[in-house]
Every structure is written in structure tokens, then in C-alpha cells.
Image: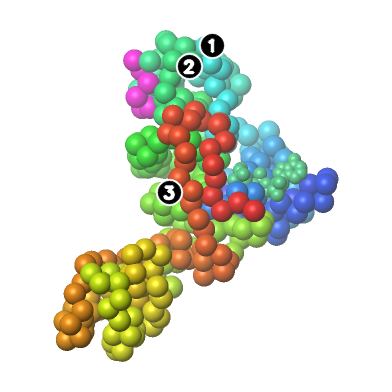
Amino acid sequence: MTEAIAAEQLGKVYANGVEAVRAVDLSVAHGEIFGFLGPNGAGKTTLISMLTTLLRPTHGSARVEGVDVVERPEQVRRRIGLVFQRSTADEVLTGRENLEIAAGLNGLSPAESRPRIREVLERLDLTEAADRRVSTYSGGMRRRLEIGAGIVHDPGVLFLDEPTLGLDPQGRAGFWEYVRELRARHGMTIFLTTHYLDEADQLSDRVAIIDHGLVLKTGAPASLKEALGSDVVQVRPSDPNSGLRSVLERIPGVRAVEPAPVDAAIRVRVARAEAFVPAVVRACDAAGIELAAVETRKPSLDEVFLSVTGREYREETEGNPTNGPGSRARRAGGR
Ligand SMILES: Nc1ncnc2c1ncn2[C@@H]1O[C@H](COP(=O)(O)OP(=O)(O)OP(=O)(O)O)[C@@H](O)[C@H]1O
Ligand SMILES: [Mg+2]
């Protein structure tokens, strides 16, 4: 069977000369959750717009379920669902009415759409709120409704552009569950963009890390992290002037030692944190250094990003959890 999504050397140069996406190769299998991860302005929306036929590539080609996005855009559109980065729900209509419009736009007759809408409302926990105006919905409910509008015609591939932007942590966690369920129950292929490293990590079977329009790395989050080959052990002495650093540097198996940003703690990179902690305790004991804390950390996608770009992927906390979808909360790692 062909892949769900395939792109070869796909690129976009905007009229103003900005090269937003450069020669991207992609291959997403049926039923896969694929995360397209990158900071602000990396080219995520541009890429998703080309894959969903909204934007014409300037070079390369792409197919969705085997259908070329430039040659047969209307056939591609029938096969996909799309949820935009910004909110598209009509506030003055009810949830059900919004879904009726989406169903009509996707070519479903009223007779076909009624049972589908009922099912979608049920699945997204919106049955009770279905006949209320969207203006009374919470941010999480709106996002769910928008997903509902994206899947009402039962597409094979669902594209989500920054689906959790502006949701609070609880709303995001709930959303992840829905996405997993869509895949588990319906075998839907899900392509999502995100600038949240943890989201890409937890949700995706594979991720592509994009920066300045270039895909820098593709793989399963676990294998990308394992490929870095080092865990971090962070050691904090009770006395900041204890000489901890030189003690840690002498322990066999240490790959790198660096100061941690907090409380005179020291970070050590080692192959396996679990095996290293007892050695830390013994060495500090022998040197008469009292420890306040020892923490271990497996590498995260943060470190993967750092290793492929040479830059920190700093995530600023989303200022205000009540920000509705579509509001531009403060963003990560911009330029
Ligand atoms: N219509 C346009 N005309 C010119 N340049 C554009 C246009 N749309 C986007 N760009 C530029 O292309 C680059 C990629 O933008 P894009 O919106 O694809 O990034 P993104 O990863 O989706 O960012 P964000 O995280 O902010 O949504 C940016 O430099 C942006 O300024
Ligand atoms: Mg975007």
C-alpha cells in the first residue's frame, strides 16, 4: 500500500523571497501519528498548507494517500481533514450547527450527516453542549469542536496545525487522549505540527524536527533521544562552596561536567544515570560533602534539538491559561 503522506524535495519560496520550506522529504505511514516539530516561524504552517492543497509548492511534489496535491487537489481534499492553527468555529452558532456546515462543505447530505454528527459529538464529549452557542464554550471545548469539524466526513488523514496552542495543561492532556483514540479506533493517520517538545514526544510515533524550513532530523522520539547516548545526573551540595565539581570530575564514566543553572548544582553526563548515582553518593561521602539533592534525567527532545541546531529550544510558559484558541500566546524559541 502507498504511504499516507509522501513528499519529495517539497519547498516554498514566498513572493517576498522568504524560503519558508526547503526541499523537505517525508514519508508517513497509514495509521501513524507524525509530529512536525519546530520553533516559531520554522515553516510548519507553510508545509501543512502545501500538503492540504491550500498553498502551491514552488518546487518538489507531495501526495496524500497516493494522490498528487497539485494535480488533483479536489481529490486530496476529500480524503483529508484539516484543523487550523487559529480558531475557525462560528461563535454565534451552536456546536451542532458548526458541524452541519462542516459536513455540508465536505459534501455530505443532511441525511448522511445527521448520524455522523451525533457520533462525532458523542466521541468528543460535546453532546450536552451541542445546542449551545460556541461563544459559551471553553477553549478545550472549541478545540474539540474544531477537530469534530475536521473529521465529520471520516477522512483517512487528519492534519492538525498547532492543535493545542492556547490550551492549559489539562486541556492539552485531554486533547492528546482524543488524538490517540482517533488513531486507535479508526486507524486514522494524524499529521500534527507543534512547537511543544513534550507534546511531540508523548504523542508522536515519529517526529521531524524542522528549523528555518529544513528538516534536520526524523525518527521515533525514543530513538532520537537514545542516539544522544547520555543521561544527566544533577547533584546539589548542601554547601555551595564544597568543591563538588572536582570530586564529580574524578568519578570514572563521567563524560561531561557543567554547572546547572540553579543553586550551585552540578550536571554530569553519563551513559546510564541509574548506575552512576551510587558512585556519586560514595565519592561525596568519602570527600565529606553533604548532598542536598541528586536528580536524574533521561535526555529529552530539548537535548535532541540542541544537538541538531546548536541552540537551546527554550519554551516560554504560555502566559495565560484562559487564552482562547487562536490567541497568540507567547511562543517558543522564535527569532
Ligand atoms: N504569506 C507569506 N508571505 C511571506 N512570508 C511568509 C508568509 N507566510 C509565512 N511566511 C514566512 O515563512 C516562514 C515560515 O512561516 P510559517 O508560518 O510556515 O512558520 P510556522 O512554523 O508555522 O510558525 P508559527 O510557529 O509561528 O506558526 C516565516 O519566516 C514567515 O515569516
Ligand atoms: Mg504556524
Q: Are marks 2 and 1 in contact (CB under 8 Å)?
A: yes
Where residue 223 appears, x then y in whole percent?
Answer: 41, 67
Rendered-image quarter of ligand 1? top right
Which residue is labeled 1 in the image? 92
10 Å crowding of disc 2: few (<14), some (14-19), many (20+):
many
Task: Depth check: give the residue in front, 87 or 48.
Answer: 87
- Element on which disc 3 rests: helix
Residue beneath label 3, please? 199
Q: Is residue 253 above or below residue 2?
A: below
Checking the image for residue 134, the label placed there is 2
Can the viewer see residue 16 in this picture? yes
Decide: is 170 above or below 92.
Answer: below
Q: Nearer the viewer, residue 252 or 195?
A: 252
The residue type indicated by label 1 comes to Val
Residue 123 or residue 212, whichever sits in front = 212
Q: Is residue 278 left or right of residue 109?
A: left
Q: CA distance from mark 3 to mark 1?
A: 31 Å
Q: CA distance from mark 2 to mark 3?
A: 26 Å
Dot 2 amino acid type: Val
Colouring chosen for the image of the structure: rainbow
- Sequence-wise first label, 2 or 1: 1
Name the element at disc 2.
helix
Circle 3: residue type: Glu
Question: Residue drawn at (61%, 21%), measured in percent from left and top?
Answer: 105
Residue 101 position within the rendered picture, expressed as x and y whole percent measured from the top left: 56, 17
